[in-house]
Image: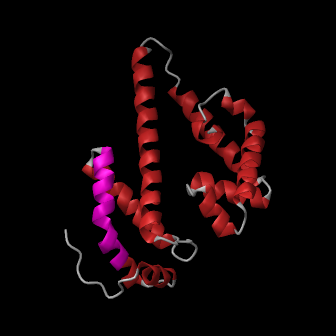
Amino acid sequence: MTPKSHAISDDAALVQALSDGDARAFAEIYERYWWQLFSTAQRKLGSREAAEELVQDLFAALWQKRASSQIEKLPHYLNKALQYRIIDYLRVRTTHAGYLSYRQAQPLALDRSTEEVVAADDLSVALAESITQLPESTREVFRLSRLEHQSVAEIADQLHLSPKTVEYHLTRALKLLRVRLKDFLTLLPFFWLIK
């Protein structure tokens, strides 16, 4: 697939126009990078539908966060964002497959699906409350790292902090959340938090 001629040939100018809310710049970024991102996702996932969904989600997030995103190198930023989405997708799929295989190996076990749903809901509420109780700087670093999947370097640049300070806030957040959520850690796997 060969790209058409572009009104703005420089990525930095495209990123600046995007952050100013220029829909044409967004369309140009989409046209320029969609196929490469889609091809990468499809190769790694082996599913056209999943690849399309992840790439569409990536571009939706790019548009929604256009004013706040700190993008220095557009191809690197897009590939990193796709990599995080692929990892999350595979983690969810692997966890789900492992759970199904566990359930099939336990055919006589008591069906506790309602109890598990309630426990998961309780965990979600407790996690949300615990995150809001973190100190503001620690909460922001945690949010960018765990919920927006930004690297330590990206967070440091965005918040004008040193990487060591970002690591300190992440360690602090995880310690505080482990203490506040200790009752849940024995009930449900909490892989994304303790990694």
Residue 125 vs 164, above or below: the answer is: above
Does residue 95 show up?
A: yes
Q: Position of residue 66 (x, y in %)?
A: 51, 75
User: In the picture, residue 67 is in which quadrant?
Assistant: bottom right
Magenta residue span: 28-45
Taking 106 as reference, is 135 left or right? right
- Foreground of the two, 40 or 59: 40
Residue 170 vs 161, above or below: the answer is: above
The furthest residue to the bottom: 7
Q: Position of residue 21 (x, y in %)?
A: 48, 83
Disc count in the image?
0
- Foreground of the two, 88 or 156: 156
Does residue 130 show up?
A: no
Quarter occupied by the N terminus: bottom left
- The colour mode here is secondary structure
Quarter occupied by the C terminus: top right
Residue at image coords 27%, 46% = 47
Residue 22 vs 155, above or below: the answer is: below
Q: Position of residue 161 (x, y in %)?
A: 72, 65
Main SS of residues in magenta: helix
Taking 175 as reference, is 1 left or right? left
The furthest residue to the left: 1
User: In the picture, residue 145 is in which quadrant?
Assistant: bottom right
Residue at image coords 76%, 51% = 168
Residue 61 vs 119, above or below: the answer is: below
- Foreground of the two, 27 or 7: 7
- Give yes or no for residue 9 being in the magenta stretch: no
- Give yes or no for residue 33 being in the magenta stretch: yes
Q: Position of residue 174 (x, y in %)?
A: 72, 44
User: In the picture, residue 33 is in which quadrant?
Assistant: bottom left
Residue at image coords 42%, 60% = 79
